Image (cartoon, rainbow, N blue to C red):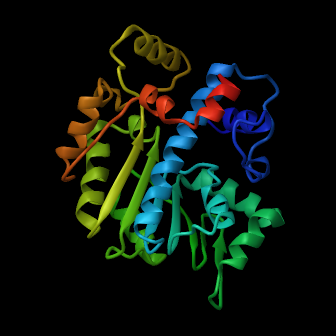
Amino acid sequence: MSYSCRFAVSVGYWKDPYIQYFVRQAKERKAPEINRGYYARVHGISQLLKAFLKKTECNCQVINLGAGMDTMFWRLKDENLLPRKYFEVDFPTIVTRKIYNIKSKPPLSKPIMESHSGESLLIDAHSLDSCRYSIIGADLRSSSELEEKLKKFNMDTQLPTLLITECVLVYMTPQQSASLLKWAASTFQTAMFINYEQVNMADRFGQIMIENLQRRQCNLAGVEVCWSLESQKERLLLNGWETANAIDMMKVYSSLPQADVKRYW
């Protein structure tokens, strides 16, 4: 995702002044369809996130699971929309790379320091913890490890909590993702879960995607849950969530700002 996002930002689909510090510019141009798809994805997640922040008046926490090189913390700070605390979790190897970039690039480290009011800021190879922002290296397939590390960095189970996964659960077995969803549903007093993921994977386009990934030794271990919008909703309802809604990207496209649609389409 990172290179495609960097390219879409570079040609003006949306503004992200921070992605340049994490991701090198792609050498080849990306097709307009790819740029539009990423723009719709970023816009859709952002709208839901900001609606949650406004509903809670930012008295909440956000946990981005499998965050990669995401820059949402910095963009929210620029808009004065930071939650009480913003957590990111990913594999330790990814986290190490992200922390290195933050430490070595003042445009990334300065906003963290500006939002930090404590006496000490913890930072090592596999984790970073400030008052408002934490990055944690952990394996999402182990809910007990995840909870232990989040609590170490002051996760508050009483605060309204938004959890985000983008194309993450599909790489876990259905049993592993079910365990993560159950943990999230049972741990927080009030919670919302945003999951961006494939649907209609049984159709011809879906099958071609699976075959292409398999050729590259990339196995979608959780693809059987991605057959439809209904199967995506069902997985949440079966794992402790009271309500679930699902929309496809065509619905998201139809809700995009018309000025943007005319400019890019």
In-image side of 192 versus 152 (left or right) = left
In-image side of 147 versus 51 (left or right) = left
Depth order, front residue of 19/41: 41
- Depicted 173 relative to depicted 51: above or below: above
* Residue 55 in picture, x, y percent from top left: 40, 65
* Residue 184 in picture, x, y percent from top left: 30, 58
Number of marks drawn: 0
* Residue 212 in picture, x, y percent from top left: 52, 15
Depth order, front residue of 132/122: 132
Work out which residue is located at the far bottom of the displayed protein and give it. 119
Residue 64 appears in the rendering: no
Q: Residue at x 45, y 57 (%)?
A: 51
Q: Residue at x 38, y 39 (%)?
A: 172
* Residue 253 in picture, x, y percent from top left: 50, 29
Q: Residue at x 33, y 63 (%)?
A: 144
Q: Residue at x 38, y 76 (%)?
A: 156
Locate the N terminus and report the quarter of the image it occupies: top right
In-image side of 232 versus 249 (left or right) = left
